[in-house]
Image (cartoon, rainbow, N blue to C red):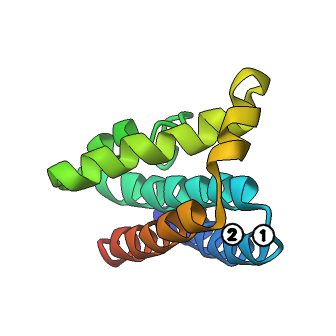
Amino acid sequence: MTKKEYIDYWCKSSNEDVKSMHAIFNSGRYDWALFVGHLAVEKSLKALWIKNNESDFPPRTHNLLKLAIEAKYELSETEKLLFMELNDFHLESRYPDYKFDFYEKCTKEFATEYIMKISELQICILKKI
């Protein structure tokens, strides 16, 4: 595959995850909607990482802040905080010792706020590609 094909793959996958995030949100599974939202941002960052690095294979990490820095994404302080908050959605929805606490935190209002932030962030990242 060419560099462009790898980038297109990650962008397409990110866009599909955003659609899934909204569908899951609409089903009332707010914790999983946020988990998939994390994946959408992660995949958009991996596309940007490929664009801005020599390799076609981004690091195997789910840490959005690390990916953003390595993708040469210029981060504001607000975005740094957002990436750190979104990292929690990946950890807290996957591991049993955090999962129930995260589920309790994920009210419709909480999820709505972050779904909007994730959607905007994903578009912003993809525009840099």
Q: Is residue 77 left or right of residue 98?
A: left
Q: Quadrant of the N terminus?
A: bottom right
- Amino acid type at mark 1: Ile
Q: Which residue is mark 1?
A: 24
Whether residue 116 appears in this view of the structure is yes
- The answer to whether the residue labelled 1 contacts the one labelled 2, judged by CB atoms less than 8 Å apart, is yes
Image height of 2 relative to 95, above or below = below
The residue at the point 70 percent across, 44 percent down is 104
Task: Using the image as rendered, state which of residue 32 and residue 18 is in the foreground.
Answer: 32
Q: Residue furthest top?
A: 97
Dot 1: within a 10 Å radius of its alpha carbon, few (fewer than 14), some, or many (20 or more) residues?
some
Q: Quadrant of the C terminus?
A: bottom left
* Quadrant hosting residue 110: bottom right
- Amino acid type at mark 2: Met
Q: Position of residue 127 (x, y in %)?
A: 33, 78
Task: Using the image as rendered, state which of residue 111 and residue 62 is in the foreground.
Answer: 111
Report the Cα–Cα distance between label 1 and label 2.
5 Å
Dot 2: within a 10 Å radius of its alpha carbon, few (fewer than 14), some, or many (20 or more) residues?
many
Q: Is residue 107 left or right of residue 57?
A: right
Mark 2, secondary structure of its residue: helix
The residue at the point 49 percent across, 63 percent down is 114
Q: Position of residue 120 (x, y in %)?
A: 40, 75
The residue at the point 26 percent across, 46 percent down is 80
Q: Is residue 117 left or right of residue 23?
A: left
Whether residue 75 appears in this view of the structure is no
Mark 1, secondary structure of its residue: helix
Q: Position of residue 13 (x, y in %)?
A: 65, 67
**Residue 21 - label:** 2
Q: Residue furthest right?
A: 27
Q: Position of residue 37 (x, y in %)?
A: 60, 61
